[in-house]
């Protein structure tokens, strides 16, 4: 086999591996949203406690995201991702046993696995295809969103239509993560060992104002996304929508967002700055949530859910794009990704938990909407600042990145 054909074959294997990994980074979480009420009734848990099923993975993202770059530098990013996929598969299976303790422990495990992949994949892509960062990020984020949408839509049909129950409905996603393990194995054979970083730049990523702006944009857009995943079906039911339709409206939201998920990274890479994209995302969210608050027919609600879909599709892909756009190399991209996903997901973890708590306290969705509108405004402000054309260490070239 010629060297050119070998490189092409390796590129195809890498693309397949990236897509299958991306398939697993949201599906095991989004599959839970439509099943929340069924799980709550079966386990006799409160709204605030059941909200932990969405919050625990986010807490895992927050706690372990800063550790992922260090582990990756020690064992290699590709090998670390493989281990993370095995942990993810184990967590999915444990969560599906039906025991309440295993439900939460397994959820935390899958959150750990996803956290590591979340952080390291942007750095791997930046290192292998720096000139194609926008296209690769678009494919990666679109694949993630596509399977997340599918998972939301099939949860109720699997649990009720095929009489699998919520346990087996959630267990099915271990098949997909197992496929990702097999597809990623070739990437560990010739992985690039981390290159040494010169001593001319020793400043911590946590001291960068721009890095914090990227982090807070990441945090608030993620918080809104997971609030939608966890509670929008319940909110729609309170507006007169039946449970299966609410689940499919959540799927519609994610399907509609796919074009934005794919195209925004490409557009972001070609623009001088990304401020206009960030403000557009905030505006779409404001209109969509306002419409859902006032309610309407299924057709009208479908329109507003579609606006949420465009916003969330653009939001996650812009966040992932900023890790590369605001960094000069793969090392900085991994560190920025680790910071943004650590602090960002700790912020995101509070949203679903607070919404469940507010509903238990006030028996109304009004406090939830007030919280969401506040997050949208904050996201727009930080996204506007994070969108300026600058690298995180551009203003401090003589300090050392830690």
Image: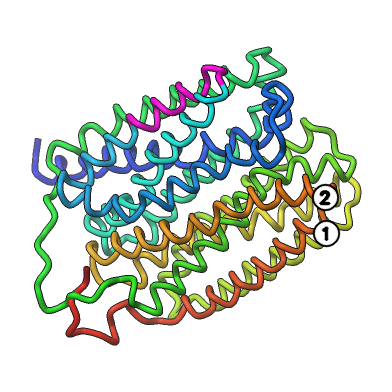
- Above or below, 397 relative to 57: below
Callout 2 touching callout 1 (CB < 8 Å): yes
- First in residue order: circle 2 vs circle 1: 1
Q: Which mark is residue 291?
A: 1
Does residue 358 appear to the left or right of 295 in the view shown? Answer: left
Q: CA distance from mark 2 to mark 1?
A: 7 Å
As for residue 370 lying within the magenta part, the answer is no
Q: Residue 399: where, in percent of width, then height?
A: 19, 81
Badge 1 crowding class, 10 Å Cα cut-off, few under 14, some 14 to 19, many 20 or more, is some
Q: Residue 170: where, in percent of width, then height?
A: 55, 24
Q: Residue 142: where, in percent of width, then height?
A: 49, 49
User: In what element is the residue under mark 2?
Assistant: helix
Look at 62% across and 54% down and name the residue there: 351
Look at 61% across and 33% down and name the residue there: 32
Q: How many marks?
A: 2
Look at 29% across and 52% down and name the residue there: 67
Position of the N terminus by quadrant: top left
Badge 2 crowding class, 10 Å Cα cut-off, few under 14, some 14 to 19, many 20 or more, is many
User: In what element is the residue under mark 1?
Assistant: helix
Q: Residue 97: where, in percent of width, then height?
A: 52, 17
- Above or below, 324 relative to 250: below
Name the residue nearer the viewer: 229 or 12: 229
Name the residue nearer the viewer: 141 or 267: 141
- Above or below, 124 relative to 191: below
- Above or below, 186 relative to 399: above
Position of the C terminus by quadrant: bottom left
Give the main secondary structure of the magenta stretch.
helix
**Label 2 belongs to which residue?**
301
**What is the quadrant of residue 334 in the picture?**
bottom left
As for residue 98 lying within the magenta part, the answer is yes
Q: Give the colour scheme of this rendering.
A: rainbow
Q: What are the residue bounds of the magenta stretch?
A: 86-99
């Amino acid at each position: 086999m010629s060297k050119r054909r070998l490189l092409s074959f390796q590129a195809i294997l890498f693309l397949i591996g990236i897509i299958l990994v991306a398939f697993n980074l949201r599906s095991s979480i989004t599959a839970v949203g439509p099943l929340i009420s069924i799980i709550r009734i079966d386990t006799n848990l409160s709204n605030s406690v059941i909200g932990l099923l969405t919050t625990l993975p986010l807490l895992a993202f927050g706690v372990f995201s800063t550790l992922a770059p260090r582990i990756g530098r020690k064992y290699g990013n590709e090998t670390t991702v493989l281990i993370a996929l095995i942990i993810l598969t184990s967590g999915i299976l444990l969560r599906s046993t039906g025991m309440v303790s295993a439900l939460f422990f397994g959820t935390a495990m899958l959150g750990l696995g996803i956290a590591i992949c979340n952080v390291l994949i942007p750095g791997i892509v930046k290192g292998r295809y720096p000139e194609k960062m926008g296209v690769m990020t678009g494919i990666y984020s679109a694949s993630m969103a596509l399977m997340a949408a599918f998972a939301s839509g099939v949860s109720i049909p699997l649990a009720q239509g095929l009489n699998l129950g919520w346990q087996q409905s959630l267990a099915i996603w271990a098949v997909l993560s197992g496929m990702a393990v097999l597809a990623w194995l070739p990437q560990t054979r010739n992985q690039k060992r981390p290159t040494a970083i010169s001593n001319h730049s020793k400043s911590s990523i946590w001291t960068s104002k721009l890095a914090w702006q990227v982090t807070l944009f990441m945090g608030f857009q993620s918080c809104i996304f997971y609030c939608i995943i966890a509670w929008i079906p319940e909110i729609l039911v309170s507006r007169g929508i039946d449970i299966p339709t609410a689940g499919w409206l959540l799927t519609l939201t994610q399907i509609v967002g796919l074009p934005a998920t794919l195209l925004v990274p490409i557009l972001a890479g070609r623009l001088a700055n990304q401020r206009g994209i960030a403000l557009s995302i905030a505006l779409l969210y404001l209109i969509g949530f306002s419409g859902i608050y006032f309610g309407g027919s299924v057709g009208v609600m479908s329109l507003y859910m579609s606006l949420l879909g465009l916003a969330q599709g653009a939001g996650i892909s812009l966040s992932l794009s900023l890790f590369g756009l605001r960094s000069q190399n793969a090392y900085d991209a991994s560190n920025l990704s680790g910071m943004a996903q650590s602090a960002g997901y700790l912020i995101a973890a509070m949203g679903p938990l607070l919404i469940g708590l507010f509903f238990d306290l006030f028996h109304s969705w009004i406090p939830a909407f007030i919280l969401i509108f506040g997050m949208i405004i904050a996201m727009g402000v930080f996204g506007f600042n994070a969108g300026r054309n600058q690298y995180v260490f551009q203003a401090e070239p003589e300090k050392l990145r830690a």
